[in-house]
């Protein structure tokens, strides 16, 4: 057994315990590579035990040799057996074999005995004192294991070391010499690697040749000796697949997110079902059609999934035609507490029962991205539900690797089923491949039903690879499916689940907005809404006349237009739209229809502007002609004779207007002429006084 030494310098050195007799413990000192530093030494038992009890020595044996006999070559076996036979008389004599002087004397005797002529080679075997002693020490340093005498070629050949050369080229002489070849110095190699790293040379011949031309132009143009193309590739490729080169190529943020080495497990500190649920969202890989308007493309959907970290049991799922946000994420939390049997039947899945997906709960702790459950809305909901929410750090998908793996597997499995039915084109698809949007045939409920069926198959029949089974699980021979692990945790009272009424939870999680209102109702999403019940109408009137606020707080379900409530004095009252055209099921469809009306209005805008321009032009023409007529008759307007002039206009209007009577005189009858315009003029007040002699 070996023991690691802890000292103030924190250097890694070890003591290999070799043998114990009545009084002493024999050991040998090793370095951090398992090689002998000094020894053998011996110390009293009590002193060695004291070093262990005071933690100066701690059990650690990183140098154990595990070599399969079938993996050892015949030549190496012969060398091992030859060395073992050479030192067998020494290592079998304990504790004398740990005395350096005795080993040296015994080695001299062995050399003398075996210094004889070999019959085949007719030469003496080269057995030296150093060979015998080094074999003994190697045997002891390996923990007195026979395979410790196998040849060690780890440091042979100087791997990684630079060859020391002055004026001579290394390697085989080229078949065709140009006279420009050179032996690269450290500075030349540094230039090549720096250039390779800076320009991120791709691994294809054209890019490498172009990079070599640029490298030659920059550093060796006009010089007699310069590196060849093979030398450029040899030293450039040395750093291409190193950690530093990858870091330089993709940047520190992406390297830490996608390429760095990972240790630990996402299931650490998870004790049972509901201890933690991981939550994430992503864009679905299938193009979807509208559920209301046939053959209308609405784009790709957003998938939300919540998975129990202990059992990998999917707890809730939702698929929405909207971007990821708290409002859309809350639909998944409602789905977690929903009766899965009834919900699956609403999707057309009738061959399942409650025992196939026994999840109607929320987890005590939810682990999600910062964008999903972060903000004042999420904080108020968490306070009401008593749920702990932890947000993952930026660029750390490894912290929620369970949900990341589940989403990737789910999308990959349904991809084969949906191939040719709206599946997003892959990066390696040919250029002539058809547009996937034109191949779309499924709406989002049908895509969700396909996903749920895949989840039900995973829960019951697919084992979780690499799941760390506990001793209790192994004792009962647990088959590691999500359903079996979940039931095991429930049966052993390991759960930390929260039970919520779906209706109460749904109202708590509904999206809230402040909307204006008037006597006609509450204005929301371009429509007016009115209370459904008499209690709601009473509360609405009290809010209108008794409250000081001019806005109403609305809670609504984004997926169902029939679930709209306004809150007044800690009570919720359902609303319904006043307009009859609100017949769609979700607000996304409602907004789609509203956007379509806006598009139609925008398309009709040129015609409207043309008609408006003609209207304005006609009106301005009348005004301009009237101004010209006024200027021709004089700029001053006579306002004193308004009453008499108005009487004339009334008479004229009656004769020319729609109520004018057309009198047809008999033939031969004389028609009196209309009186002159001046005769109808009413005399002014001064003229009337003069006529009366006043």
Image: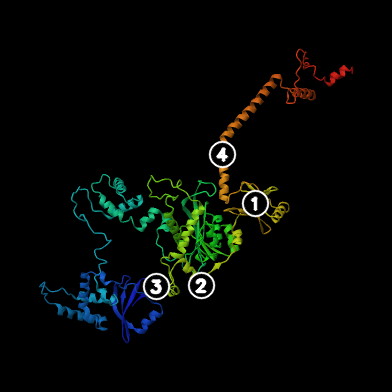
Out of 223 and 264, give the one closest to the viewer: 264
Q: Badges 1 and 4: C-beta atoms under 8 Å apart? A: no
Residues packed near mark 2 inside 10 Å, few (<14), some (14 to 19) or many (20 plus): few
Real-space Cα separation, disc 1 to disc 3, in angstroms: 77 Å
Where residue 491 is drawn, which disc sits there? 2
How far across and how far down the image is residue 87, in percent? 21, 78
User: Where's residue 204, x and y in %?
Assistant: 31, 50
Q: Identify the mark at residue 8; answer none if there is no mark.
A: 3
Residue placed at 23% from the left, 82% from the top? 102
Q: Which residue sits at x=58%, y=45%?
A: 594
Q: From the viewer's perspective, is the residue at label 4 or at label 2 nearer?
A: 2
Q: Nearer the viewer, residue 20 or 354?
A: 354
Q: Quadrant of the N terminus?
A: bottom left
Does 228 sit left or right of 533 as displayed? left
Q: CA distance from mark 3 to mark 2?
A: 51 Å
Query: Which SS class for mark 3?
Result: loop
Depth check: 314 or 197 in front?
Answer: 314
Mark 4 vs mark 3, CA separation in Å:
79 Å
First in sequence: mark 4 vs mark 2: 2
SS at mark 4 in the image: helix
Q: Please state which of the two labelled residues, at mark 1 or mark 3, is closer to the viewer.
A: 1
Percent position (x, y) of residue 596? Answer: 56, 43
Location of residue 124 with respect to 224 vertically, above or below? below
Q: Secondary structure at mark 1?
A: strand
Location of residue 272 in the rendering, given as x and y in whole percent from the top left corner: 50, 69
Dot 4 corresponds to which residue? 602
Which residue in the structure is indicated by mark 1?
576
Q: Earlier in the sequence, mark 3 or mark 2?
A: 3
Q: Are marks 1 and 3 in contact (CB under 8 Å)?
A: no
């Amino acid at each position: 057994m070996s023991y690691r030494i802890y000292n103030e310098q924190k250097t890694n050195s070890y003591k290999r315990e070799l043998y114990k007799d009545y009084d002493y413990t024999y050991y040998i000192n090793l370095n951090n590579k398992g090689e002998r530093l000094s020894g053998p030494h011996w110390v009293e038992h009590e002193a060695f035990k004291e070093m262990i009890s005071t933690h100066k020595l701690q059990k650690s044996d990183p140098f154990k040799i595990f070599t399969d006999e079938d993996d050892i070559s015949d030549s190496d076996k012969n060398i091992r057996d030859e060395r073992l036979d050479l030192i067998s008389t020494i290592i079998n004599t304990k504790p004398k074999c740990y005395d350096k002087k005795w080993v040296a004397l015994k080695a001299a005797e062995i050399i003398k005995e075996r210094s004889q002529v070999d019959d085949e080679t007719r030469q003496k075997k080269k057995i030296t004192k150093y060979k015998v002693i080094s074999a003994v020490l190697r045997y002891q340093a390996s923990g007195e294991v026979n395979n410790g005498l196998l040849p060690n070629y780890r440091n042979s050949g100087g791997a990684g070391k630079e060859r020391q050369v002055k004026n001579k080229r290394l390697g085989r002489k080229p078949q065709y010499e140009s006279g420009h070849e050179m032996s690269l110095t450290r500075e030349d190699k540094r230039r090549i690697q720096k250039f390779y790293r800076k320009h991120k040379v791709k691994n294809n011949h054209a890019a490498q040749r172009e990079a070599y031309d640029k490298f030659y132009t920059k550093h060796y143009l006009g010089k007699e000796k310069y590196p060849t193309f093979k030398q450029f590739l040899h030293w450039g490729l040395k750093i291409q697949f190193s950690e530093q080169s990858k870091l330089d190529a993709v940047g520190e943020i992406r390297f830490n997110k996608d390429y760095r080495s990972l240790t630990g497990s996402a299931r650490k500190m998870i004790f049972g079902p509901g201890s933690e649920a991981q939550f994430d969202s992503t864009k679905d890989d299938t193009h979807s059609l509208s559920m209301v308007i046939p053959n209308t493309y609405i784009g790709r959907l957003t998938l939300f999934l919540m998975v129990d970290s202990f059992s990998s049991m999917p707890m809730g799922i939702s698929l929405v035609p909207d971007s990821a946000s708290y409002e859309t994420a809350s639909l998944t939390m409602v789905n977690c507490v929903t009766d899965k049997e009834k919900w699956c039947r609403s999707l057309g899945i009738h061959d399942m029962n409650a025992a196939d997906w026994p999840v109607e709960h929320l987890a005590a702790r939810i682990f999600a991205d910062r964008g999903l459950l972060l903000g004042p809305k999420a904080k108020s909901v968490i306070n009401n539900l008593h749920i702990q929410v932890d947000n993952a750090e930026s660029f750390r998908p490894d912290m929620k690797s369970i949900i990341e793996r589940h989403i990737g597997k789910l999308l990959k499995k349904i991809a084969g089923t949906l191939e040719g039915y709206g599946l997003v084109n892959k990066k390696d698809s040919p250029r002539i491949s058809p547009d996937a949007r034109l191949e779309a045939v499924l709406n989002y409920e049908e895509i969700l039903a396909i996903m749920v069926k895949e989840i039900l198959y995973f829960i019951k029949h697919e084992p979780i690879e690499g799941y760390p089974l506990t001793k209790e699980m192994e004792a009962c021979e647990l088959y590691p499916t999500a359903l079996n692990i979940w039931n095991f945790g429930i049966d052993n009272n390991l759960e930390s689940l929260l039970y919520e009424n779906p209706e109460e939870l749904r109202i708590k999680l509904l999206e809230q907005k402040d909307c204006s209102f008037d006597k006609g109702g509450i204005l929301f999403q371009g429509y007016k809404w009115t209370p459904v019940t008499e209690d709601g109408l009473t509360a609405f009137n009290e809010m209108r006349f008794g409250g000081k606020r001019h806005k109403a707080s609305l809670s609504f379900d984004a997926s169902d237009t029939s679930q709209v409530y306004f809150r007044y004095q800690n009570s919720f009252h359902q609303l319904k739209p006043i307009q009859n055209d609100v017949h769609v099921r979700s607000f996304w469809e409602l907004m789609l229809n509203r956007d379509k009306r806006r598009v139609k209005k925008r398309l009709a805008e040129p015609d409207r502007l043309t008609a408006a321009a003609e209207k304005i032009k006609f009106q301005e023409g009348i005004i301009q002609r009237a101004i010209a007529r006024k200027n021709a008759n004089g700029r001053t307007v006579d306002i004193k004779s308004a009453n008499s002039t108005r009487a004339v206009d009334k008479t004229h209007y009656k004769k020319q207007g729609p109520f004018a009577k057309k009198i047809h005189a008999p033939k031969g009858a004389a028609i009196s002429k209309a009186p002159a315009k001046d005769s109808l003029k009413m005399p002014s007040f001064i003229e009337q006084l003069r006529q009366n002699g006043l």
